[in-house]
Amino acid sequence: MQTAEVVIIGGGIVGSSIAYHLTSAGCKDVLVIERESAQGKGSTGKSMGGVRAQFSTPINIQMSLYSIPFYASFDERVGHPAGYRPQGYLFCATNKKHLAYLLTNFEKQAAMGVKDVRLVSAEEIRSWFPQLRSDDIVGGSFCPTDGFVDPYSAMIGFMSWAGDHGAKLWKNATVTAIHCDSRGVTSVDASKGTVVTRIVVNATGPWAAELAHMVGIDLPVKPLRRMLVPTEPFDQFPHGAPMIIDMSNGFHFRPEGLGFLLAWNDPEETSGYKTDFDPGFVEKILTRAADRVPVFENLAVNPKRAWAGLYEMTPDHHPILGPVPEVPGFYLANGFSGHGVMHAPATGKILSDLILSGKTGLVDAGLLDLARFTEGRTIHETAVL
Ligand SMILES: Cc1cc2nc3c(=O)[nH]c(=O)nc-3n(C[C@H](O)[C@H](O)[C@H](O)COP(=O)(O)OP(=O)(O)OC[C@H]3O[C@@H](n4cnc5c(N)ncnc54)[C@H](O)[C@@H]3O)c2cc1C
């Protein structure tokens, strides 16, 4: 019978980063179990790849303070490109409330050590991007070390490094049951066989609640569809642009290839495993795009190239990380609420620390435990795109 010191269920970017961090800390007997025939078919392959430190809560800022420098040095550390492009995130405020919000966040970020973040004036934004309609822009905030990565490449880099250092990856293997005795987890049943183990990590992205049910745990993680629309090649807006966020309605975009990638959080979306792209979304997003960037009226879009994926939402928009005391040996790395790519490096480090030594110096992990939802300790992140 197969055995493993640690079984990680889910071979997306989070499971891969945990495998990388465990093996680099010397724990080599790691098995990653992925039900698909290839990695990246979950949320990771659908992601926009944005990375930022511009959050509103200290713990999210801390996760970014580990993760962004990690991505900046990924190629040397991991021997594989993550495609980090520090082109920044530019939040554009359109009223005084937005400005006050950005100021509060900026003070928090700067106090915590985000070095280059700064508030910018409306004039500066206008001078950088005269293509933006700026009559209602009153200022903004910009951090040049925010930017984008290639999520698929980073995931493959993490898993390849882990594989070269002892970890194994099972593909085409669906986990169907997790068994426990009075001391906790004992084994995992997968379609490829049973694995005897004392430690299991749930890294199943939007499917995390289903997996947690296998050990009788109610996990407040819900799938929520997000759609992205890539444009055809377009040269009337600079390709060195950052992720630009229109705070009046949440529309945001960034350069991608010769065109742009457009995103907007449709408030009418409801939770569920919907991964079909709704063609009606194209008009909704193009209306918002042309409203903020008038030259975007000339954008060409092929709806067949657009796609949908799933965010994994928690009630307070923070992940749920760490052990579950009721089920010894069962660990959670779930509920990233749309930030799982940018926080994958920190998550890998935190989980590896917690599994190997029961504590981590990266964050106060107790703040992100599952019990916070029943003990009234939720911490709300409002900077969710
Ligand atoms: C449109 C869109 C845009 C996004 N933009 C960003 C962004 O700009 N920045 C950012 O940081 N994040 C972004 N995200 C969120 C990010 O993609 C996710 O948070 C991240 O990919 C989660 O990674 P994961 O490894 O936890 O999940 P996944 O990549 O979903 O991996 C989970 C894996 O578990 C496997 N699995 C599930 N159940 C089982 C089972 N029973 N047995 C075996 N395997 C199983 C699945 O097949 C899957 O491969 C975006 C997401 C979407 C959809």
Image (tube, rainbow, N blue to C red):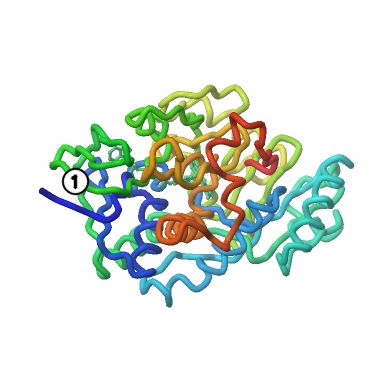
Q: Residues within 10 Å of mark 1 (few under 14, many from 20)?
A: many
Q: Nearer the viewer, residue 107 or 24?
A: 24
Q: Quadrant of residue 123?
A: bottom right
Q: Position of residue 112 (x, y in %)?
A: 73, 62
From where the camera sits, is residue 224 visible?
A: no
Determine whether, in the image, residue 181 is placed left or right of residue 295. Answer: left
Identity of the residue drawn at 63% across and 58% down: 62
Q: Nearer the viewer, residue 253 or 321?
A: 321
133 versus 347 height, above or below: above
Which quarter of the rendering shows the C terminus?
A: top right
- Name the amino acid, label 1: Val
Identity of the residue drawn at 23% across and 42% down: 187
Q: Which residue is mark 1?
A: 195
Q: Nearer the viewer, residue 97 or 230?
A: 97
Which quadrant of the frame does ligand 1 lie within?
Answer: top left
The answer to whether the beta carbon of the residue marked 1 is less than 8 Å from any atom of ligand 1 is no
Q: Residue furthest right?
A: 96
Identity of the residue drawn at 25% across and 35% down: 179
